[in-house]
Amino acid sequence: MSEQTVTTEEATTTTEHETGGISIGRVGLYATLIGLVGFYLIPIESGLVTSIKTPTALQETFPFLPPAGSGITVEKWQIAFDYLAPGMVNSMLFTIPSTILCALLGSMAAYGLTLVDWRGQIAVLSLFIAGIFVPYQAVIVPLFQFWSQYMQLGTRLSFLWGLPLLEPHYATILELIITHTAYGIPIVTLLFRSQYKTMSEEMIEAARLDGASVWRVYQRIVLPLSIPMFAVVFIFQFTQIWNEFLFSLTIIGSTNDPAASATLILSGLGQSLEGTDYPLRMAGAFITALPTLLVYVLFADKFAEGVQT
């Protein structure tokens, strides 16, 4: 071993010994990661501590500092839950069906546009791609006119409202389901198509040679292999639809409507002539965010697997 190598090893050993066996680069990496974690968590922590503050504590403490003693209260959480509970139910009623329909229809469309050859395929795919770039703002007026002037589902389905468990405002829920499904299918189709393009063509062709129909190939081969991507799509679409505000405002229109969604009710929560009740708004924001957090926790493993594909 040369003298230069020995000198280098001694210098490295000395450096690691001076830093407790951890290199300076690793210390810098950990410090950066901790700083980023703090940077992203401080707003969440500030909102959480604000939601449990009394009006006096809110004025006397900084937003990111927790209240002390009698400055803590959970009353705002109870009030927020009481206000948001009907909206949470309404949001679930149109978010879950819309997400499931987007996933199923998008998967079928991607299968037909990727693994099945037919004339005009490229033109139809171009329409799906174009649908992704249509902004929400461009369809507000046509959407409002379509549901309020032409379709009028509330009137057309009036014969159903006398049945048990059915209410007139469910017509508005149905309008939201159809709207979110139609608007979500293009992006979902492209997500599934990205996975189907990587599937083995030999496997699909072998199934066809064995006499399997187009539907049987999808049902027995493509669909089971799509489970991870379904998790990705479910999380993506559920989050998008649950947090969406513009369609709810356009179709529902008022927070007093029986079909009002959680985001629509949240937009007016805590507002009064006296000012803004920030603890109430923060509590409402956290309650509204809980379903999306729950979906991420339930589908985290499949989501990671789907992203890798």
Image (cartoon, grey):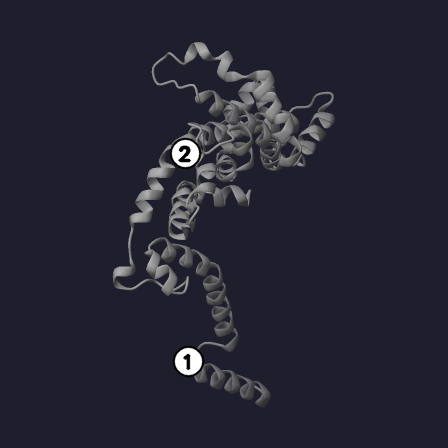
Q: Measuring 55% from the left and 88% from the top, which residue is drawn there?
A: 7
Image-quadrant location for residue 72: bottom left
Q: Residue at x 48, y 29 (%)?
A: 100
Q: Position of residue 221 (x, y in %)?
A: 52, 27
Q: Residue furthest bottom?
A: 3
Which-is-in-front pick, marks 1 and 2?
2
Locate the C terminus by quadrant. top right
Number of numbered markers: 2
The kind of residue tagged 1 is Gly
Disc 1 crowd, CA 10 A, few/some/many (<14, 14-19, 20+): few
Q: Position of residue 162 (x, y in %)?
A: 38, 11
The residue that mark 1 highlights is 20
Q: Is residue 290 above or below residue 138?
A: below
Residue beneath disc 2: 87
Label 1 residue SS: loop
| Picture quadrant where residue 181 is located | top right
The local crowd at label 2, few if under 14, some if 14 to 19, many if 20 or more residues have their Cα within 10 Å, is many
Front-most of residues 268 and 227: 268
- Answer yes or no: is residue 107 visible: no
- Which residue is located at x 38 percent, y 52 percent? 279
Q: Report the front residue among 103 and 99.
A: 99
Amino acid marked by disc 2: Gly
User: Is 223 placed left or right of 80 in the picture?
Assistant: right
Query: What numbered label is drawn on residue 252?
Result: none
Q: Is residue 6 visible?
A: yes
User: Do the numbered discs 1 and 2 sit on residues whose CB atoms are within 8 Å?
Assistant: no
